[in-house]
Amino acid sequence: MEIRTLTPDDIPYHDRLMSEAFGRGARPTWDTAQDAEKRAELSLCNRTGVFDGIRLVATATVLDMSVYWDSQIVRLGGIAGVACTADRRGEGHVGALLNRNLIDMRESGQFISGLNPFAFGFYRRYGWDWVGEKRITTLPFELLEAHAESRNVVMFEGLDAKEKAAVVYDNSVKRYRGAVARDQTVFPNFWKRTLDHHDGRTTYVHVYQSPSTGEPEGYFICSLPGSGDKMIVPEFFAETPRAESGLLGALHYYGTQFKLVELTRPFDDPLTLSIMHWDVDVKLKPLFMGRIVDLTAAFAGLVAPDSVRGEAVISVTDSHCDWNNGSFKLVVEGGRITVNRTTGNPDVVTDIQTLTQAYWGRPGLAALRDAGRVIVTGEDGYKLLSKLLPESNSYVGDFF
């Protein structure tokens, strides 16, 4: 067995494996234009595979993504396209690829990683864990009302709205950890993915524009289903209360076509502050899975409050990354955090999955301690770590 980076000559074999794993066996087709596009894509990501002779039996892709983190932008290794052919599953090939990916991400400076799992338990074995939550709210259209601010909402089709939507998106997601900086991520083109028309149906974007300046203050996206009574709104951001009211008022008019609307929004969604009824159904769902790839770089990448000073020793178990496994001394001074290995007694004992969740900020460090996943032997060190890793909201609206 051999693990290596895929080459352009491997593209047909990769496509066949993707078809088996995700396309239910649909026969892939190629033409000159598609081949050129796939070759270009290959140069924009790290795609590795396990080969048995010339046969590709498993593959995984690492996307080099830029994400917001406390108003900074950091690099995240996005794990995508993980697949193994059906007759070779259970032999450890995907695990071997993930271990290789962790080494590659660390060497390239991607000190955190994220993925959308087919099964949370599978990836937890390799150090990832669920991070953050989102709210999916379903309600009858009859609970939405017309609003005078709706006159400031303009409808666009697909990518025609990109310039206006991007302004609102960036302003809105900067306060979250992990949201994709779409214009600063080279591949894939997340704005095209979000706004493009799909399955022969039009993607509509409703933008609220300031009545005085014309500047965008909010938007929502929808693609109308061909059948059924429920309309899906996968993205809804409002920077101001008037934009929130105007967009909900504009959404109200779709009640002539559908009975229900489903909105996906960040955990701190204010919708239920203005609309509450027994028929409002709110579900909390995990965002995706995250992982600290390089503990030292992850802490060094944080900006500590100037008022925070002190030391803490943490002991971390990471069975897949020996560079994260052991005890580390964190020294905080002047807004900077330095990390070095130590043999000193730990103040906090945990594993990489739990530390990852605390690093993303939800679930928070205190809740993880209450659950018995953080063992504290030094309260001062724990308090310092709590200041470095405060509870925080995360958001990821992009699937990869």
Image (cartoon, helix red, strand yellow):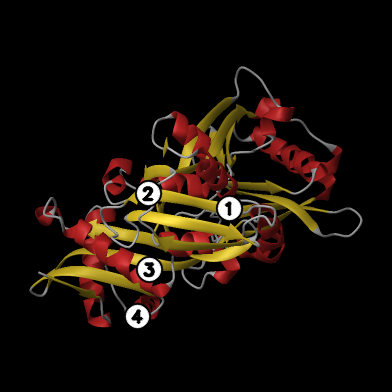
Residue linked to disc 2: 315
Closer to viewer: mark 3 or mark 1: 1
Identify which residue is drawn at 35% across, 60% down: 80
Q: Please tell me which of labels 2 and 3 falls first in the chain.
A: 3
Q: Please tell me which of labels 4 and 3 falls first in the chain.
A: 4
Residue linked to disc 3: 106
Q: Quadrant of the N terminus?
A: bottom left
Furthest-front residue in this view: 344
Q: Nearer the viewer, residue 178 or 42?
A: 178
| Label 2 neighbour load within 10 Å: few <14, some 14-19, many 20+ | many
Q: Amino acid at mark 3?
A: Arg
Whole-percent x and y of residue 206? 70, 51
Q: Label 1 vs label 4: CA separation?
A: 50 Å
The disc at residue 310 is 1
Q: Label 4 vs label 3: CA separation?
A: 25 Å
The quadrant in which residue 29 appears is: bottom left
Helix, strand or loop for disc 1: strand
Whole-percent x and y of residue 207? 73, 53
Closer to viewer: mark 1 or mark 4: 1
Q: Please tell me which of labels 1 and 2 falls first in the chain.
A: 1
Q: Amino acid at mark 1?
A: Gly
Q: Quadrant of the C terminus?
A: bottom left
The disc at residue 65 is none
| Label 4 neighbour load within 10 Å: few <14, some 14-19, many 20+ | some
Q: Amino acid at mark 4?
A: Arg
Residue linked to disc 4: 39
| Label 3 neighbour load within 10 Å: few <14, some 14-19, many 20+ | many
